[in-house]
Image: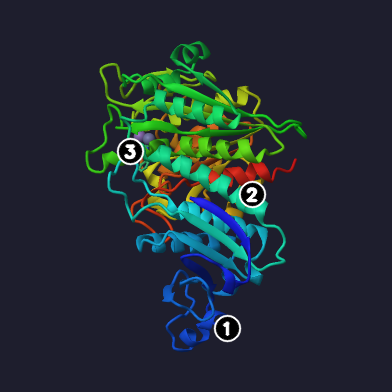
Amino acid sequence: MELNLRYQPLEAVEADAVVLVAFEGQKDARAGLAEWIEAGEITGKMLEMTLLHQAAGLRARRLLVVGGGKPEAFGPPELRKVAGAAVRLLKGRSIRRAALYLDAGLAGAEYARAAAEGALLGDYEPDRYKTTKNNGQAFEQFTVAAAPGTSDLGEAVERGRVIAESQNFARELVNEPANRLTPTLLAERAREMAAAHGLECEVLDQDRMRQLGMGSLLGVAMGSAEPPALIVLRYRPAAASGSSHLGLVGKGVTFDTGGISIKPADGMEKMKYDMAGGAATIGAMRALAQLKPAIPVTAFIPAVENMPGQRAQRPGDIVTSMCGKTIEVINTDAEGRLILADALCYARGQGCTHLVDAATLTGAIVVALGHIYVGAFTNDDAWLGRLLSAARAEGEKIWHMPLEDDYKDYLKSAFADLPNVGGRWGGAVTAAWFLKEFADPAPWVHLDIAGTAWLDDAKPYSAKGPTGVAVRTLVNLAMNWKE
Ligand code: BES
Ligand code: MN
Ligand code: ZN
């Protein structure tokens, strides 16, 4: 999709359709809209869509009016949705060149960036393997338009392009089926991306991990014929200010059968998305390579396939993690925490001072928060506070979940330092508590994205399937770093 920026009066904009945002309770003198508003046909309700032909005084043949809801509740995250919904509606009608007009109140940099992002995110379709594409052909041209004399929005639109393309890159990875994205192939994709954008990429193989004592990660890999990989992506700023080093850790289970504690067949095909946390960190690194934050950022993606092969680990097996703690594997389906344990420990050893992990870790977080909020757990409230402000600015919904010492009793093993599962209750919390044992003492946030990394039903502004959740928050966190 070609992305443009124009400074023109609304009347002069040339496109197959020009898109305007209309707000609830606002009289609107633009393009003859007053008439439609008075008639009650346009109300301005959030994402209400009205496609008009030959609107008064416009050069563009069509006018798409998208509701923005109440003006006081409108910000860049809402505009992102508006732009995405506009693109999806238009391309469904074979209209593939549009301009979103940002009038006075919307002509700031954060709005311009959100408009560009929304258009690119809305255009994404998980149809790589369909010979007949979903929802028509891809969009051709999207223009962000604002009045002449508006301050320069070029850099903002460019940032939006980088971030949204990186989020879509993560979605492409998540969408890949497990036969086309094994741990080895995921490492190859990360390597290609790193070469294209000037990041360092190192892939630790099984032998190296054995030397390092990563028994917890390697135990999960035992059941698969596909070898595991620990993918490391490094960004270093030209001149680092301060002494912080951000570490991003992403769960990269390319397929989760459950292992010997095998999952039911129903819906198991979705478990190709069990590497969405890893994809989010790879996507974030792709954006950071181009946006160049002031601090070093390193991503660690433990990539494995969780299979019940002949050499698979068994319930009751005891493994030793890199940090020396022993783990009793009660349930081989609680594999994410096992691979993250070694990756977190390794990340600390690599000098990371602040950690964030993203993982499709538990079904329990879906029970707790549904498909709306990401669950966040931390050992450092101030550090989580910074991540939550990044998330708010990016329109990603993240909820602070509890993680207190009271939960410690839920994780007791008679035979090892820790079991890999707690009891029946608080499954997302016990999973997070397990991770904390390996992240401590570094300030750390765990994002459980099991409910939010995949959309079962399309939204007006997004296709069904992979969402690329967490990419924007991670990028914002690194870009707005304060010591
Ligand atoms: N990958 C799953 C979690 C998951 C579930 C992600 C549903 C997306 C949708 C994870 O590895 C898993 O299997 N977790 C188990 C843990 C249990 C065995 C303690 C779960 O949530 O059932
Ligand atoms: Mn599992
Ligand atoms: Zn899993």
Distance between mark 3 and mark 2 Cα atoms: 31 Å
Residue at position x 39%, y 59% from top? 91
Disc 1 versus disc 3: nearer the observer:
1
263 versus 69 height, above or below: above
In the displayed structure image, the side of residue 172 where residue 470 appears, left or right: right
Q: Residue at x 46, y 33 (%)?
A: 251
Between disc 3 and disc 2, the foreground one is: 3
Earlier sequence position, callout 1 versus callout 3: 1
Question: Which of the 4 quarters of the picture holds residue 257?
Answer: top left
Task: Report the Cα–Cα distance between label 2 and label 1.
Answer: 42 Å
Image-quarter location of ligand 3: top left
Q: Secondary structure at mark 2?
A: helix
Tell me if I can see residue 391 in this picture.
Answer: yes
Q: Which comes sooner in the sequence, label 2 or label 1?
A: 1
- Which residue is labeled 2 in the image? 385
Three-letter code for the amino acid on which mark 3 is drawn: Met
Of residue 100 and residue 245, the one placed in the foreground of this image is: 100
Residue receiving disc 3 = 271
Residue marked by disc 1: 29
The picture places residue 193, in percent across and down from the top left corner, at: 52, 31
User: Looking at the rendering, in which quadrant would you find the C terminus?
Assistant: top right
Tell me the quarter of the picture where residue 194 sits.
Answer: top right
Secondary structure type for disc 3: helix
Instruction: Please provide percent x and percent y for residue 287.
Output: 58, 40
Q: Establish whether ligand 1 lies closer than 8 Å to the Cβ of label 3.
A: yes
Label 1: few (<14), some or many (≥20) within 10 Å?
few
- Contact (Cβ within 8 Å) of mark 3 with mark 2: no
Whether residue 416 is visible here, answered yes or no, is no
- Is 185 in front, or is 54? 54
